[in-house]
């Protein structure tokens, strides 16, 4: 029987060493591949299990049965959902157990909350304007530019807006009333509505010239009924538009909240 030489033994050891190295590399490669596949599957599973807005809505309604939710939407922030209430209020929710009140801003100073609120207002406006009851409004002027106004005769900001716009001869205002000062507002509205010349009384009231006359104004039963019927229509419109304060304007199908005179002037120039 022939015995292996020293050279033969060394050659075999070298081959065995090479095989071990390749086997080790194969094991390392296979391990790395399996880790990659496992990680990818976890990521895909995580993405697939991300709750849909509808799922979030259903979960919130179970947690808060009294919460009236109009819609749930994704936001640019991963894992944060926009919750829109029936009243139009916007809050934010994370399924990790957080509810966020307030606005979300970008680093360049843009409020995405304000942009969404404006977008929703314009969407509501487009529907409301299709059936706007202009015959129920008090018409002021005969200009080519139209302003829809929701105001209160004793609201100081409404009077400020009137002062800024009174010299515009190119506008027509359709005024709807939203009484926020109780009996005083009702009497001021009655003073305008029940007169023979509502446009003139509107100017006197909103300029403050008729405050003394309004205080002494006697509202007849017929006038009382007329104003109540009219205010039912006006308040209903304000609620549909989700008006939270006066004055409120619609110009060029754009909403203007408050006596924002620069914005009003800008929109009038576009008309």
Image (cartoon, grey):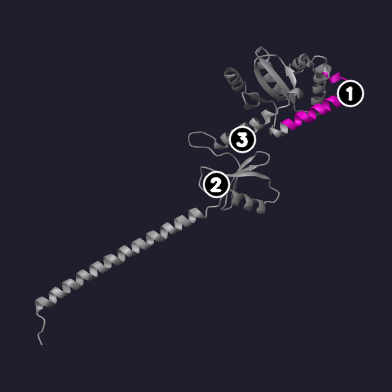
Between discs 3 and 1, the one toward the N terminus: 3
Between discs 1 and 2, the one toward the N terminus: 2
State left or right for residue 169 relative to residue 27: right
Quadrant of the image containing the N terminus: bottom left
**Secondary-structure class at tag 3:** helix
Quadrant of the image containing the C terminus: top right
Q: Main secondary structure of the magenta part?
A: helix
Residue on which disc 3 sits: 120
The quarter holding residue 220 reads: top right
Mark 3 Cα within 10 Å, few/some/many (few <14, many 20+)?
few
Residue on which disc 2 sits: 80
- Residue 59: percent from the left, percent from the top? 62, 53
* Mark seen at residue 19: none
- Residue 254: percent from the left, percent from the top? 61, 26
Does residue 228 lie above or below 200 as drawn?
Answer: below
Q: Mark 3 to mark 1: distance in Å?
A: 39 Å
**Secondary-structure class at tag 1:** helix
């Amino acid at each position: 029987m022939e015995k292996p030489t020293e050279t033969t033994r060394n050659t075999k050891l070298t081959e065995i060493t090479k095989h071990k190295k390749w086997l080790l590399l194969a094991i390392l490669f296979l391990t790395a591949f399996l880790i990659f596949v496992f990680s990818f599957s976890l990521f895909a599973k995580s993405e697939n299990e991300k709750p849909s807005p509808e799922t979030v809505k259903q979960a919130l309604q179970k947690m808060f049965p009294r919460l009236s939710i109009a819609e749930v939407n994704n936001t640019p922030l991963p894992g944060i959902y926009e919750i829109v209430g029936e009243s139009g209020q916007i809050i934010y929710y994370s399924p990790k157990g957080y509810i966020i009140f307030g606005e979300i801003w970008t680093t360049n100073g843009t409020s995405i909350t304000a942009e969404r609120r404006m977008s929703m207002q314009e969407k509501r406006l487009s529907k409301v304007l299709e059936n706007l009851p202009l015959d129920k409004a008090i018409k002021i002027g005969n200009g080519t530019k139209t302003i829809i106004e929701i105001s209160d005769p004793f609201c100081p900001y409404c009077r400020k807006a009137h002062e800024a716009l009174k010299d515009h001869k190119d506008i027509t205002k359709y005024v709807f009333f939203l009484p926020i000062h109780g009996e005083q507002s009702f009497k001021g509205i009655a003073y305008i509505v029940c007169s023979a010349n509502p446009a003139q009384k509107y100017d006197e009231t909103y300029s403050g010239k008729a405050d003394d006359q309004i205080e002494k104004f006697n509202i007849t039963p017929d006038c009382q009924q007329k104003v109540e019927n009219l205010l039912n229509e006006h308040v209903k419109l304000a609620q549909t538009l989700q008006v939270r304060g006066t004055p409120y304007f619609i110009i060029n199908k754009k909403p203007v909240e408050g006596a924002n005179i620069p914005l009003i002037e800008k929109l009038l120039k576009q008309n």
